[in-house]
Image: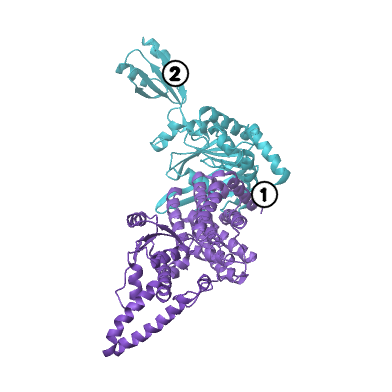
Chain colours: A cyan, B purple
Amino acid sequence: MASVLLKVQQLSKSYGERRAVDQVSFQVHAGQTVGLIGPNGAGKSTTVSMICGLLRADAGSVELDGVAVLPGQSDAKRRIGFVPQDLALYEDLAARENLKLFGALYGLKGAQLKARCDQVLALVKLADRAADKPSTFSGGMKRRLNIAAALMHDPQLLVLDEPTVGVDPQSRNAIFDTLEQLKAQGRSLIYTSHYMEEVERLADHIVIIDHGKVLADESPAALHLRLPAQAALRVELAAAPPEPLLAGIRGLHGVTAVHNGGAGIDILLADGGDALAVMGWLERQGCRPLHFATARTKLEDIFLNLTGRSLRD
Amino acid sequence: MTALIALIRKDLILFLSDRRALLINLALPILLATFFGYLFGGSGDSKGGTIDVALVQQDASEIGNKIAAGLKAEPSLQISAMDLAQAQDAVRKGKRKAAIVIPAGFGAAAGAALFGAGPQPEIGLLYDPSQPAVLAMVKGMMTQQVMQVVSADMFNGQAGKDFTDQSLAQLEQQAAGDPERAALRDMLAGVKKYQDREQARPAAADAQGAKGGLSMPFSTRDQALTSGPAEMHYNGYAHAFAGMGVQFVLFMGVDMGIGVLLARRSGIWNRLLAAPLTVTTVLLARALSAAIIAFCLLGVIFLFAIAVFGVQIASLAGFVGVALCFALLTASFGLLIAAFGKTPEAARGIAVFATLIMVMLGGAWVPSFMFPAWVQQVALAVPTRWAIDGFDAMTWRGLGLAAAGPAMAAELGFALLFALLAVWKFRRDQA
């Protein structure tokens, strides 16, 4: 296991009577990508704000390599790159000028600043648009430049607060390509989102947060094991299935739940459950499915299982 | 230091690349100041405007003609002859500020009234009620003309001689039993001797202007007084450029404050504070860039006034001091808006209203010395009043560097107060 880069301990923050973050603790190891997920208002952005030294915690601490991260001139902030949820760019300043500004805020200057601009622009594939203003960019290009600005000072830890909000699928893929490249370089990432599929694609470790509290802090594989089912089988029939047929499926080995979906049946299978065995049994009953599909259970199902509500509620 | 300079540089680039902001912040104040400066008396070189007056001359006597000629010769009046209906219409519509109506028989009646021997005839004065000051001016000039012409005619003219002969005949009959009448008769007898002698004088003497009448027993020597060198005179453009410069630079400060609010909303603010900077550094950078922009704007606006309208600077050091302090005041005003504004939209409305009140009370539109005394006292609590008075002192009043001191101190005091309040609020929000 790599060394611990970021240590978040018992972090709490209240706004008046409302407890936005309640004793949140987790760690990020060097080179690890941690997905911080939760519905809107769960406390993700407040947690991220304290991690990046934007907000002072009421209680608890954030340490990067043993150095406290605090608002103001904290040295630890030099090693963190922050990609805000909103596009944090000067629309009427050329892309290169934007990057030069954000680099200079971390003390870069002269040839070092110029070289870093070139590297980062190449990384986000905007080298040919360096002289153009972001106001002329597509939404996806702006998002990439938004990430580039946080990379100027070559941070050890990159914190991304929902970086794909309002982005089209093509641009989202471009952003993911960039992030996967960063991950491959060994950079640590914290990625907040309420899109489970994004986190599943990227994260080595997942922290689920709701109502300001950590509900789960595990690897994706470990989280899947928390569910009574690890796979789902959907079978579509020509007519609504009779109750005896459904009861028969429920009795099969590894089947944890069966839902009658009208012309289809949703079957959840526990670890060890065999979708092919179920299909074979159905054939033996003279039931010929029009269509069938299997899928692994999703983090969305895990969140539902943990909180009783959907991520997008 | 690198971060501070980078932030200031960014603001300057953004300001210069915004053509609309440049137009608003430079062209509009120059345009409006030019207009107001012209209204306030221009560069002070001209003799001043004339008053458009209609003249209705219903008395064709020699006295009536002389009064009309005298009024037409008056340099402060622009006389147009009209009939009564035309004159009334012109005054009603504001085409003439006043009309003088010399009624028929005025000359004879005025002569008699001069010695108390008849009722006073009336000269009609029609005036625009929106121009009450004009009434007094026209009345004064007309009084001078009438007294001069009527008295001259009574002492020198044929009408006066006829009137004296007629009055003497009447008084001879009444003087026997009335000592007062006898005294008046003796006085008129003296006047008659004077008239006979004047009529016997050769015509050449008349041509030399020897014929007089009652005239003003004094004249005035008008001298505009400022504290500067003698060649420094009042320039209405100086005050107008100070007023409009202050107003539009403050608007720039409002825009700066709104810009910070927009940055806080957009996430740029968080990105800036995610860097190893204090909120004070970020605010200081924004304030310094705004102050630099404000100072440059004032400089360009006044350079235009100097080049085109001959506005003079009495003390360059004092002027620069007042401008620098006002630039800092503008910057801190912007920070105050950014600190206490809830949303950019709401803050803009309140800030523009506050700015307009400040520039109005500060004397940007109408000089503060024209305010009622109590308003002048209240206006001392308004920072713009000190700025405009400071610019006035350094330009058309021709005062020295020492006179800039109070204005600079007041501006810096307000700037410090605004900045402290803003930093306190920003820090409280960040906690």
Q: Which residue is mark 2?
A: A293
Mark 2 surroundings within 10 Å by alpha-carbon count, few (fewer than 14), some (14 through 19), many (20 or more): few
Q: Earlier in the sequence, mark 2 or mark 1?
A: 1
The mark tally for this picture is 2
User: Closer to the camera, B107 or A135?
Assistant: B107
- Kind of residue indicated by mark 2: Ala
Q: Chain of mark 2?
A: A
Q: Position of residue A211 (x, y in %)?
A: 42, 44
Q: Is residue B216 in sight in this rendering?
A: no
SS of the residue under disc 1: loop
Q: Position of residue B300 (x, y in %)?
A: 61, 54
Which quarter of the picture shows residue B299?
bottom right
Q: Is residue B4 above or below residue B209?
A: above
- Identify the image quadrant of the N terminus of chain B: bottom right
Q: Is residue A251 above or below residue B75?
A: above
User: Closer to the camera, B354 or B175?
Assistant: B175
Q: Position of residue B58 (x, y in %)?
A: 34, 61
Left or right of A27 in this view: A284: left
In space, the residues marked 2 and 1 are separated at their CA atoms by: 55 Å
SS of the residue under disc 2: strand
- Kind of residue indicated by mark 1: Gly
Evaluate if marks 2 and 1 touch, with contact meaning CB atoms under 8 Å apart.
no
Q: Which residue is mark 1?
A: A107
Q: Chain of mark 1?
A: A
User: Closer to the camera, B327 or A183?
Assistant: B327
Q: Is residue B337 in sight in this rendering?
A: yes
**Residue at figure coordinates x 50%, y 48% from the top left:** B264
